[in-house]
Amino acid sequence: MKTVYDVQQLLKKFGIIIYVGNRLADLELMEMEILELYKTQLIPKDIFSNALLLLRMEIEKEKTRGKRE
């Protein structure tokens, strides 16, 4: 898993489509959904870890991007 798109495709496999219109909110909701999938043992730990790391990095990018504007 290398991109946010990959995480979106993973969520889509479980019927989860997230689009709020605000990228930061989208990323945070994706993080919550990935956590729920892991808690219910629908995804393995390695996929969970990769997805969570990727989303948290993107969230930080968005927060710093928001501060610059």
Image: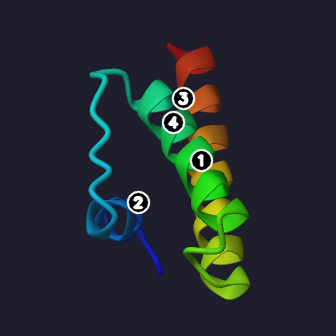
46 or 44: which is nearer to us? 44
Residue with the mark numbered 2: 4
The amino acid type, in three-letter code, at marker 4 is Leu
Which residue is at a point 49% across and 29% down the rendered structure image?
24
Contact, mark 1 vs mark 4 (Cβ under 8 Å): yes
Q: CA distance from mark 1 to mark 4?
A: 5 Å
Q: Secondary structure at mark 1?
A: helix
Q: In the rendered structure, which disc, 1 or 2, sits on the residue that comes first in sequence?
A: 2
Establish if 29 lies above or below 4: above
Residue with the mark numbered 1: 31
The amino acid type, in three-letter code, at marker 1 is Glu
Q: CA distance from mark 2 to mark 3?
A: 17 Å
Residue with the mark numbered 4: 29
Contact, mark 4 vs mark 3 (Cβ under 8 Å): no
Q: CA distance from mark 3 to mark 1?
A: 19 Å
The amino acid type, in three-letter code, at marker 3 is Arg
Q: In the rendered structure, which disc, 3 or 1, sits on the residue that comes first in sequence?
A: 1
* Mark toward the viewer: 4 or 3: 4
Contact, mark 2 vs mark 3 (Cβ under 8 Å): no
The amino acid type, in three-letter code, at marker 2 is Val
Residue with the mark numbered 3: 65
Q: In the rendered structure, which disc, 2 or 3, sits on the residue that comes first in sequence?
A: 2
Establish if 60 lies above or below 46: above
